[in-house]
Amino acid sequence: MYLIDMLRKLGDRLGIIEMAPASAKLQGPVKIQTRTVTLTELITSIRVTELRELAGMPSELSVPFEEVFRAAGIPGSPQSWTIERLEEFLKGDAIRKLGREQAQHETLRMLAEGGVDSSDIVRDAVARDQALDAFEDSITAKRREWLEAKRLEIRQVEEEIASEEKAWSEWKKRKRQREKDMAQAVSYLIDKPVISIGEE
């Protein structure tokens, strides 16, 4: 008997069982209807190709999330219940004033009264999360290629700079040697140094 009471309390907390006071008329066990939803049922197929194309745009980081959801093929009907509509409902003054359990109870009651299947909202949230993840993956791949190209450019520029510095250093050495040779030749004509010799 203790186990049944624990399961009822847990079900009440999770919002899948609503505890009601015992009625004097009820003699037999109460039949509890539950519904199991698998993760597979919650996963929705999204249009990955369209998301890759959207991520390929030059200003991909400024693309609004709604555009990402549209590209993924997620419907955005304002009449239907979506995760965004649920978020707006939960931000309302009436719900925000309630504790978590009361807010959960009120939300589930309101959805039940409206004939809304809560798994549809969860499915919508999962689909939007999948779309954002796929969009991020595409941007990550694009950024990886961009960063590799930039690193290659940097290496090439560094090599060019090193090559230029080496050529410049060798030219200055040749210049100093030429000046020394001229200074030595001129020294046979006059005692005063007239050739400037660059520093080492």
Image (cartoon, grey):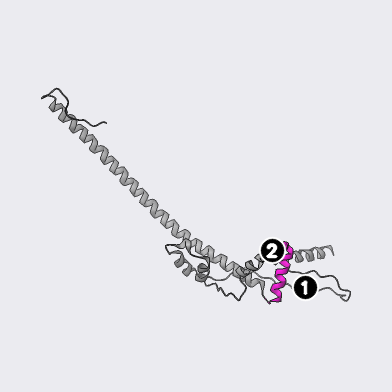
User: Does residue 190 sit above or below 89 in this rendering?
Assistant: above
Q: What's the magenta bit mostly, secondary-structure-wise?
A: helix
**Residue 99 screen position, x and y as percent:** 73, 62
Identify which residue is drawn at 79% across, 66% down: 8
Q: Quadrant of the C terminus?
A: top left
Circle 2: is it few (<14), some (14-19), or many (20+) Cα within 10 Å? few
The residue shown at (23%, 38%) is: 171
Q: Residue at x 50, y 64 (%)?
A: 135
| Residue 119 painted magenta | no
Count of all numbered marks drawn on residues in the image? 2
**1 or 2: tag closer to the N-terminus:** 1
Instruction: Kindly indicate the quadrant of the structure image that contains residue 177.
Output: top left
Instruction: Reply yes or no: does residue 109 show up in magenta.
Output: yes
Does the CB distance between marks 1 and 2 fall below 8 Å?
no
What amino acid type is highlighted by mark number 1?
Ile
Q: Position of residue 6 (x, y in %)?
A: 80, 63
Callout 1 secondary element: loop
Q: Give the magenta range.
A: 98-115
| Residue that label 1 marks | 32
User: Is 158 placed above or below 83 here?
Assistant: above
Can residue 153 be seen at all in this image of the molecule? Answer: yes
Q: Which residue is mark 2?
A: 96
What amino acid does circle 2 point to?
Arg
Residue 108: percent from the left, percent from the top? 71, 70
Alpha carbon of mark 1 to alpha carbon of mark 2: how far?
30 Å
Q: In screen coordinates, is 97 left or right of 187?
A: right
